Amino acid sequence: MSVDAAHTAPHQQLFNTPFPIIMAPMFLVSNTAMIKAAMDNGITGAIPALNYRTDEELRAAIDELKAHGSAPFGINLIVNKSNVRYKQQLATCLEKGVDFIITSLGNPKECIERAHEKGIKVFCDVIDLHYALKVQEQGADAVIAVNAEAGGHAGNVTGESLIKELCENLDIPVISAGGLARKVDVERALSWGAAAVSVGTVFIASNEAGVTDAYKQALVDYSAKDIVRTTKMSGSALTVINTPYVQKIGTEATWLERLMHKYKPLKKFIKMFIALRGMKQISNAANKATYKTVWVAGPSIEHIHAIRPCSEIIHDLTQG
């Protein structure tokens, strides 16, 4: 199926846009300028709620996007206990009436139930069939199938294998995430049965992205072979660019980071500590052009050759 032919695809029922593409929510990268570009160019997008330090800032961002136009947009929520702001973030999304919520890293049951009461759709990140079946049973409107080529918290299965397995076993739409930087990548995912795609890494190298010029330039200068996985940032495997600093600190978790896997009573507290520490490191990477940076990205940087406006990137994804 081509991107153009996808006008009648299931994505129309998930989010009413001309093209079946979500600008993926990226921690400390996504911002309202990027989402506005998505809204203006026939796709949709989402922002992580954790990109805002306060509820007032999150509310202001949602209001800004609603004032921009009627095109749909969403908010990404971390739904596990490490996100101490989750309850308030969910309440704000429900009150403001966002078009959809993307859930990550936890049990989305409460989010799905409460969002559906307000007519808000929920798409759940999954990396395998086991979890996908669980969220389908809980009422998820779609799953976002995060494959091994995704940036950030990547899965372990190739895009083709994961999409086909999920499509064969689920009754809800499957959205493909990982390894998408060109129109041909989007069309390939749709041909495997995906209802839509979620595209992240390529938008980091945009004029509008909320990161340093050094971070953006790194996506141009490095290639797929420079992407490695680290467990030091959040306790879960995260794909990053193998910069000299990453090589210096290594990619394996320390004894403290591994401790949470052995002693379950301490797991919640240790995981929260690691997550908060990891977020600070990612924050430094996103906002300070220094040698000590950790830059999240996926292997699709292979196809990034310049820093461009989001509108041009979207044009290439949809028109070729």
Image: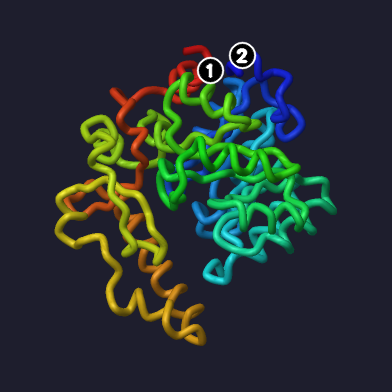
- Quarter of the rendering occupied by the N terminus: top right
Q: Residue at (33%, 26%) from the top-left corner?
A: 303
Look at the image and tell me whether residue 31 can be seen: yes
Q: Position of residue 235 (x, y in %)?
A: 39, 66
Question: Helix or strand or loop: what does disc 1 sit on?
Answer: helix
Q: Residue at (23%, 41%) from the top-left corner?
A: 226
* Quadrant of the rendered image containing residue 245: bottom left
* Quadrant of the rendered image containing residue 88: bottom right
Task: Report the residue marked by disc 1.
Answer: 318
Which comes sooner in the sequence, label 2 or label 1?
Answer: 2
Q: Left or right of 24: which side holds 14?
A: right
Q: Residue at (63%, 36%) from the top-left corner?
A: 65
Q: Position of residue 282 (x, y in %)?
A: 35, 55
Label 1 environment density (alpha carbons within 10 Å; few <14, some 14–19, many ≥20): many
Residue 4's disc is 2
Q: In the displayed structure, would residue 17 be above or below residue 72?
A: above
Label 2 environment density (alpha carbons within 10 Å; few <14, some 14–19, many ≥20): few
Whether tag 2 and tag 1 are in contact, CB under 8 A, the answer is: yes
Q: Amino acid at mark 1?
A: Thr
Q: Position of residue 190 (x, y in %)?
A: 59, 26
